[in-house]
Amino acid sequence: MATYVILTRVSPGAFRDPSAFKEVAQDVAARIKSECPAVVWKESYSTLGGYDVVDIVEAERPQDVQRAAMIIRGYGHATTETLPATPWKEFLDRL
């Protein structure tokens, strides 16, 4: 399986009360689980800086990750950037 990093910026208008983000996140996660069963979620992180959330996922096909990213955009009221990622040791072995 290939590894991907999904970087997400949540729209300022996505919710009024920060605690409401929990419900948005649960809705998005349920929708991805239902519609993108081939995407395996490895880790999710809240970050400070240019992105609000960093997700690490695995999938055989990039189009499955693309679908998940579009769900995050549409239902999560966010923008995303998706990057393919190579484990460091594997990268060094290829050099």
Image (tube, rainbow, N blue to C red):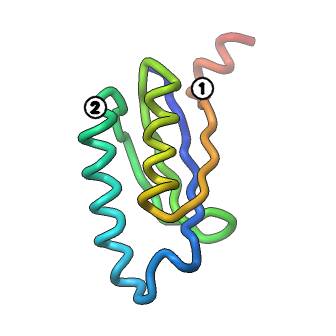
Q: Position of residue 34 (x, y in %)?
A: 24, 40
In this view, the mark in front (1 or 2): 2
26 or 48: which is nearer to us?
Answer: 26
Locate residue 38 relative to residue 14 in the image: left or right. left
Furthest-right residue in this view:
95
Pointers 1 and 2 in contact (CB under 8 A)? no
Locate residue 43 relative to residue 91 in the image: left or right. left
Residue designated by label 2: 37
41 or 17: which is nearer to us?
Answer: 17
Residue at point 60%, 26% (across, down): 86
62 or 55: which is nearer to us?
Answer: 62
- 18 to 46, vertically: above or below: below
**What is the secondary structure assignment of the residue under circle 2?**
loop
Instruction: Categorize mark 2 by other alpha carbons within 10 Å: few (<14), some (14-19), many (20+).
Output: few
Residue at point 58%, 78% (across, down): 12
Return the mark for residue 86.
1
